[in-house]
Amino acid sequence: MNVLPLLTDPNAWAALVALTALEIVLGIDNLVFISVLTARLEADKARRARQVGLSLAFIFRVIMLAGLTWLMGLTAPLFTVFRMAISWRDIILIGGGLFLIAKATYEIHSEVESRENATAATSSKRAFAWIVVQLVAIDLVFSLDSIITAIGMAEHLEVMIAAVVIAMIVMYAAAAPVGAFISEHPTTKMLALAFLVLIGVALVADGFEFHIPRGYIYFAMAFAGAVEAFNVMAKRNRRRPPRI
């Protein structure tokens, strides 16, 4: 693996910048899911769960990049339904999307029906293990979607791995603040759960070969996030004592 020629290749640097930006944007889905999932854990266990989730996301992406031939085989049609070819990739995306929709719906129901004594942080080993299992499942789906989307933007495996490493570092740095913010503001958590339903629908649509441009989804998320940020600032201002 000779990396020295790539260091002086402007095309490789351009591909690295573009692919890193794409990986960071595609990683937003994963980051929101991890933040929502770890919101009920104690601070120490939440930090460990985030580390496990992001580490698994990185490992899955590197393994998939190293096995590009196998990965491309996942797009080969297995059977046809209503004149629509279904591959392993489609099955994984549909299953992952349905899982996200079901999980987000369950969490929304739990938030709506929650009682005061049910809002305490979860600390049991079983709860932590179940969260890790869910992170493994959804990391696989997001990693598959991310890498297949990114293939073709860079010709060299070294550039792809470097982009994944940089994106994972950015996500790791952002995971704790995002998780703390969602945990502190219940309305923000509800918004994040709504995002997960939207992302799940997009994954299911992709599995059925109906692509919803992610730009629309991320714009909707950014707009709703900005509105919620103004709501949070307004609440803080109302809590301040009036000036005399």
Image (cartoon, grey):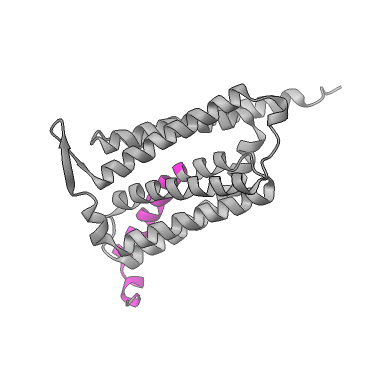
Using the rendered image of the protein, determine whether residue 224 is visible from the camera's viewpoint: no
Q: Quadrant of residue 107?
A: top right
Instruction: Say which residue appears at 67% left-offset and 35% top-offset.
Output: 184
Using the rendered image of the protein, determine whether residue 185 is visible from the camera's viewpoint: yes
Q: Position of residue 39 (x, y in %)?
A: 61, 40
| Residue 65 vertical placement versus 114 (above, below) | below
Instruction: Say which residue appears at 82% left-offset and 25% top-offset.
Output: 241
Instruction: Say which residue appears at 45% left-offset and 58% top-offset.
Output: 58
Q: Position of residue 195 (x, y in %)?
A: 46, 32
| Residue 56 vertical placement versus 214 (above, below) | below
Residue at the far front: name it: 126
Quadrant assignment for the N terminus: bottom left
In the image: residue 155, left or right of residue 17: left
In the image: residue 132, left or right of residue 241: left
State the residue in front, 65 or 74. 74
In the image: residue 194, left or right of residue 203: right
Q: Magenta stretch mostly in which secondary structure?
A: helix
State the residue in front, 136 or 125. 125
Q: Quadrant of residue 203?
A: top left
> In the image, is residue 95 part of the stretch drawn in magenta?
no
Quadrant assignment for the C terminus: top right
Q: Which residues are magenta?
A: 3-29
Q: Quadrant of residue 242?
A: top right
Q: Position of residue 208 (x, y in %)?
A: 25, 35
State the residue in front, 5 or 210. 210
